[in-house]
Amino acid sequence: MNTQDIEKIIKIFEGADISHLDLEIDNIKIKLDKKETQGVKYVPEVKEDAFPLAEPDNSKEIVKAPLVGTFYKAPSADAKPFVTVGSTVKKGDKLCIIEAMKVMNEITSPCDGVVKEILAENEKMVEYGQKLFIIGD
């Protein structure tokens, strides 16, 4: 299996009416999941030995990268960014694009609010679960 084969599998998966795919071919494992492409809601982890317990800040959402790829703040090099710090966004508005294996994945806002921080750098790699944006009231 080569990169072109993997790209074909991803394109077929994106058009299919399924939300999850586990595949193993020639000792290569591929796991695809559509349900996380809309951003990830921040849920703080609290360790049992962490005292006192702090209340989570429910006034903001942290948008994390749902996949590994290259972060783009605009649709092209000469275009305006999708959002800037201070931008008001609605649930579903485009925040950025993450390119993975020549596939452009649009990352959208999980809520209404104001962009408080942009934590990723344009045209730099982001990791799965990396914090990208903070959206608040």
Image: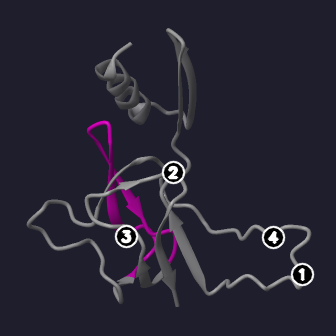
Q: What mark, if any, has residue 46 been given in the picture?
A: 4
Q: Callout 2 environment at 10 Å: few (<14), some (14 to 19), or many (20+)?
A: few
Q: Nearer the viewer, mark 1 or mark 2?
A: 1
Residue at 30% of width from left, 76% of height from top?
83
| Residue type indicated by callout 3 | Asp
Label 3 element class:
loop
Along the polypeptide, which appears first: circle 1 or circle 2?
1
Q: How is the image coloured?
A: one colour
Q: Which residues are magenta?
A: 89-111
**Picture quarter with the N terminus:** top left
Q: Relative to 68, is 19 on the left or the right?
A: right
In three-dimensional space, the C-alpha distance between marks 4 and 3, rounded to whole angstroms, equals: 31 Å
- Do residues under tags 1 and 3 come within 8 Å of each other at their CB atoms? no
Distance, label 2 to label 4, CA atoms, is 21 Å
In this rendering, the answer to whether 55 lies above or below 95 is: below
Crowding around mark 4 (Cα neighbors within 10 Å: few <14, some 14 to 19, many 20+) is few
Q: Quadrant of residue 27?
A: top right
- The residue at which mark 3 appears reads as 93
Whole-percent x, y for residue 103 in the image:
30, 40
Q: Residue at x 27, y 66 (%)?
A: 73
